Structures are given as C-alpha cells and as structure tokens.
Image (spheres, rainbow, N blue to C red):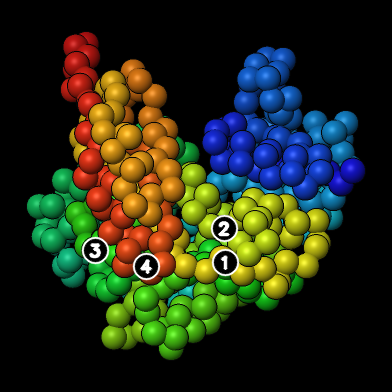
Amino acid sequence: MQKILLVASTTGYQVHSFADAASKLGVDLVLATDRCHVLENPWGDHAVPLRFDHPASNLDTLASRGPFDGILAVGDQPACVAAHIAARLHLRFSSPSAVLAAKNKNLARRRFRAAGLNVPHFELVRDPRAAARDAQYPCVLKPVALSASRGVIRVNHAAEFEQAFARIQKILERETDRSIQLESFIPGREFALEGLLTNGRFQPLALFDKPDPLDGPFFEETIYVTPSREPSAIEGAIVDTTLRAARALGLSDGPAHAEMRVNDRGVWMLEIAARPIGGLCSRVLRFENGASLEEILLQHALGRDVSRLTLTSGAHAVMMIPIPAAGVYSGVLGLDEARAVPGIEDVAVTAKEGQLLVPLPEAASYLGFIFARASTPALAEQALREAHARLRFQLTPALAVVK
C-alpha cells in the first residue's frame, strides 16, 4: 500500500476530508501535526508529533512511520514544514525557499516585481507616524506572515492609518514575525484560482469569481462561484499570470491556491500559496469521475496523471458564512429552511455551541459553509444568498474580563 504524509496544524475537518479520500483510494495516510510530543495520541488520530519551529529535527520522528511515497500539507505553515521534509526525503514538493517566499507577503511582492508582474507600491512600515504622513491614500496595511485576510485593513487617511497599525500590532502580539507592510490599494474584481503544479507546469482546476465587492475596510471573503463569468481572454490572462507568479516564487510541485484582482491595467497577483483551498470549501468541487479535490491531490502526490480530470457540468458555489459580530455562539435557527432552498446541496455549521467567535480582522474563521449547485453561476449565487438570508445565528456578547 502506498503511503502519503499529510502535514497539518490541526486535525480539523479538512484533514478528515483527506482521510476519507485516502480510504477510498486505498492509500495509507499518515498525519503529522504540531501537537505536544509528550502526550501519547491525545486525539486518537495516531498523528506524528512535529516541531514546526525546527523542521530539520522532524526526520528522526518520522523515520519509524516511513518510507513515504508522497507528501501534502494543509495550511501555510504546514506547507513550509512539508517543504523541508520533502527536500530531505526526496519527495516531490516545492523547495523550502519557494514555499517561504509564497507565505511571506514582502518576499512574494519582491519576486513578483522582479518578474515584471503588476505590483502595487509596497514597503515595510518602520516608522508608523512617518509612513502615515507620507502614504498615498487609500492604502492597505497587512501583517507580512498571516493569511486568510487576518489583520488586513484598508485605511483612507492618516488618522485611520495609526489606528489600524495599532490594531494590527495587537493582533501580532503572540506572533514570531510582527512585520507590517503598507501597500497601495488595488481596485478591481477579485478571483481565486485552484490548480496543480507539476515540474513547473500549472494545471488550472477551477477559477472562482468572488461576486461580493472586497473594498475594505476589512477583506472578509464570502462567496466563491465557478465557472467564472469572465470572458475567455480574462480567464486566460489570470491563468498565465498565475503561472508567471508561481515561477517567480520558485514553486514547482503540488497544489496551488492563488488569489488575484483584475482591473483595466491587467491582472494583479495578491498571493499564490503552496496549499489547497482551505476550510470546507473544497467540497464545492466535484470532478467528472466523481472524485473530490482531496482524491485528486493524493493521486497527484503519488505521481499519477490527473491532467485529464475536469469539473462536472453546471455551476458550483460556496459561501463562507461570515461572523457578524463578536460573541458566544449558542445556536442557529432556520437551518431546515435554508437547506430547502432550490439549488442548495448542504449547509454545514462548523461553529460549536459555547465557542467565542471573533470577526475579521482579529480572527479568520467562519460560522460555517453553504454549498450550492445549479445550471448557471447566477442561479448558484442566488441560492446561496437566499439560504443565508434564512439563517439566524444566535450570538451572545462576551463579558469583558476585569483585571
């Protein structure tokens, strides 16, 4: 039986999707996470404990569970760890330097600029007061090392700049890299492209429209719809720019999730990550042979040819249900009504009762996911909006802690 190592920071629902796919394919999936190495199998998942802060120290820990025929990662930091492991074990994956550049917003921007891609003005903020005085507004402040729009804030004048900078600093208090980058705001329509890299060649799997405007002050993603409603020339430009961005970073093998904006000046790459789409979003993708995205990624990691796989006909759409305000989640009403909307395939509430939920920019989680399929992208999008309108989430404001 072939064996694949899956590196992840948690054992959440995305990991379970890979486990289900591996079982279907008859592949032995070995999970490796950054859990405490002292505890013996605390979650019942038989995961290998890894040191994410010292990737080179993990090889001895992995030796007893190998050899491995392939490697995958869920999340940005796990992808960096997987790249180091792959390089030492001679498994197919992008290089550690390429994956690090993809994760770091400043390194990525520098490599995009060197490759001649459209790049906004960007700089690391050393002196926030001077930067606020000299900035061209509107602009965007973002942590260099965080993902999923966490800590990303648009500012329109100097007073907002200083407030946003202080807010991001607080978000970064427990982070190792506390760098904050200033970028000029890029107007335009936003998209996401899911694909695979094989020896430097890029295979697009799905191009998603993001129909909700993402103009700030925060950049919470909500709806993804595929196929795109853009003309073929725009779609081609997006795919071509993604390939150029991957080459600029040095990414060569494995899943790629890219996000970009398009305006009258062309395609602007926001980021391209060495990992698949996050959360439960992958469930929206269904391929002609009935395979899930996770099945395709596992086969690709084993070196199998998946180049002929295409999405099933029709439109596929997912909504990441936004958190409207901070509070303790206690339940949801209207779930059956939402699931009864024509075109809705499922409504998955991932928030747990008693869980404290915080919206962007401090956190980057969602209440759950809504999935729709229809004959056209417009109908799939409409179904998502109708289903969401029928949901009534119950959130109780959290009591402040008095010190």
Q: Which residue is mark 3?
A: 213
Closest to the camera, between mark 3 and mark 4, is 4
- In this rendering, the count of numbered labels is 4
Which of the two discs, 1 and 4, labels the residue nearer the N terminus? 1
x, y percentage for residue 63? 87, 35
x, y percentage for residue 212? 26, 61
Which of the two discs, 1 and 3, labels the residue nearer the N terminus? 3
Give the spatial CA distance, label 2 vs label 4: 15 Å
Considering the numbered disc 2 on the image, is that residue within a helix, a strand or a loop?
loop
Q: Which residue is mark 4?
A: 377
Q: Which residue is mark 1?
A: 311
Q: Which residue is mark 2?
A: 286
Q: Which quadrant holds residue 19?
A: top right
Q: Residues within 10 Å of mark 3 (few under 14, many from 20)?
A: some
Q: Amino acid at mark 4?
A: Pro
The residue under the point 39% across, 40% down is: 347
Tell me whether the residue at label 1 lies in contact with that at label 3, contact meaning CB atoms closer than 8 angstroms. Answer: no
Position of residue 285 relative to residue 5, above or below, is below
The residue under the point 16% across, 46% down is: 163
Front residue of this view, candidates 148 and 192: 192
Q: Is residue 374 left or right of residue 47?
A: left
Considering the numbered disc 1 on the image, is that residue within a helix, a strand or a loop?
loop
Q: Residues within 10 Å of mark 2 (few under 14, many from 20)?
A: some
Q: Amino acid at mark 3?
A: Pro
